[in-house]
Amino acid sequence: MEKLINEFSIGLFFWQLVLFIGLVLLLRKFAWKPILDAVEKREEGIQNALDSAEKAKLEMENLQADNQKLLKEARAEREEMLKEARDMKNKMIEDAKTEASESAAKLIAQAQASIESEKKAAIAELKSQVANLSVEIAEKVVRTELSNKDKQLKLVETMLGEKSLN
Amino acid sequence: MQNIISLKTICLFFFFVSASVFAKEEPKEGESDIKTEIKEYINHHLLDSHDFSLTSYTTESGEHKYIGFPLPVILWDNGLKVFSSSKLHHGESVAEVDGNYYKSFHGKIYKTDASGTINLDEHHHATNEKPLDFSITKNVFTIFLVGLLMFFMFSRMAKKYKTGSLPKGMGRFLEPIILYIRDDIAIPNIGVKKYKKYMPYLLTVFFFVWIINLLGLTPLGVNVTNNIAVTLALALITYFLTTFTANKNYWGHIFWMPGVPVPMKIILAPIELLGTIIKPFSLMIRLYANITAGHIVLMSIIGLMFIFKNWLGSSLSFGLAFALSLLELLVAALQAYIFTMLSALYFGSAVEEHHDDH
């Protein structure tokens, strides 16, 4: 210990202290700060690049998923549209069919009704003509055959016979 | 795996053989000379010096020749005295400046009379007056060199980032270390919120200690971190940074430890207060002792090569010195890491937020 104290050099201590503090200050300004800043900046840059790459990847995945979803939706929509169209077509055909048959039935019914009414009218006319004829015949018979009783009777009989043949 | 085993075997072999060689060695006449010379050389190496000498040799006429260059000596002795260290001649002659006489003795400058007498006490210590010595010694020169080197190295590296965000050149090697200090030392110990203001100190201290430890392993013979003045300066900065950036929670834990009975609080306060000083003190001693011990052991083993003077002993010493050098290489980085790590730990305790769980 005594040897240590004896050997201790104030001068060396002084110069070491001065030099070292100076060196720390100088290097801090001209070396350590720029170096550490550059390194930090670089590390930050690398980190940012990695982050953005990761982000881009995620975005890409999202985009792809979106595309997939859109595609699926479009496909479903098309399916639906096709189905709708098909349904509509079927319905239209069905409607047309029923309408046609309905109108046909109606026409038939109308025809039948008019036939019926025509028939009725014809029958009625026939009846009235028959009545007229009967009246006319009766008139003629009355007019011509009133003189001869036999003839009158014969006439009535033939006339009646003719009429029934009618 | 096989490599590790064979390495271990070689190390063990060296260990046993050298141990047996040590045991057999008897001190002989004439060898004490070289032993004391080695001891003195090691001691000399561990000390600071006023000139930058790479190596020295002795001529046949017994004159010491040094290869290197002188450095300025700056003394405060009733006024500033500046002169070249070449005047001191490595402690062999007296330097005269403004009518005062100075002599270097065991790496320290003493004020002497004209003939350069050094008065010694019974412990072989000089009792002469010591002027305040602010000389640019070998160590001061080295730390300035390392400071310059670091400044150019890291400011250049910082400039490269302006052109692109990727490291270029030296940055490729240094950036992982900087990131390691940030991610594995600063952030886990201090916390994400507050680590930033300590980063300049942690980075500087790590690289400074590491580079200077590595320089100590080169054959240049510089040896900075085994000076307690250097480690004290570093530890003191850690201490002041801890103390002045500490929050209420830190002081609360020191003076009035929450969650313990009042008498215990009174007992704990001085212990905790002492702890704040012991922590940086341990930092200082750890770095100093590790590097000094490494240098002493390594140089002693290198010195053994010259003591053995036979092929077996010398080559074994060489192998051992080689293995130890590799270990010291690891220690150089490890001590820098430990100093940084513990500093970060102390900063972390100073800015720790209050937790309710204790």
Image (cartoon, helix red, strand yellow):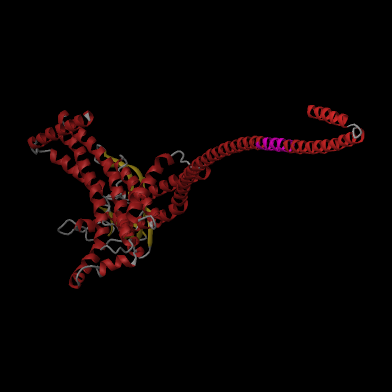
- Please give the range of residues in magenta: A98-111
User: How many labels, in total?
Assistant: 0
Is any atom of residue B127 visible in this view?
A: yes
- Residue B131 versus residue B144: which sits nearer the camera? B144
Residue A149: quadrant of the picture = top right
B355 relative to B39, above or below: below
Q: Residue A110: image x %, image y %?
A: 73, 38
Q: Residue B315: image x %, image y %?
A: 19, 30
In the image, residue B12 lies in the stretch drawn in magenta: no
A93 relative to A45, above or below: above
- Residue A77 versus residue A122: which sits nearer the camera? A122
The quarter of the rendered structure image containing the C terminus of chain B is: bottom left
The quarter of the rendered structure image containing the N terminus of chain B is: top left
Residue B28: quadrant of the picture = top left
Answer left or right for A135 relative to B213: right
Q: Main secondary structure of the magenta part?
A: helix
Is any atom of residue B63 visible in this view?
A: no
- Residue A143 versus residue B320: which sits nearer the camera? A143
- Residue B153 versus residue A146: which sits nearer the camera? A146
Residue B131: quadrant of the picture = bottom left
In the image, residue A106 lies in the stretch drawn in magenta: yes
Answer left or right for A137 relative to B70: right
Q: Residue B308: image x %, image y %?
A: 15, 34
B296 relative to B82, above or below: above
B249 relative to A87, above or below: below
The residue depicted at 18 percent of the width and 31 percent of the height is B10
**Residue lying at the far front of the rendered structure:** A149
Q: Residue A59: image x %, image y %?
A: 51, 43
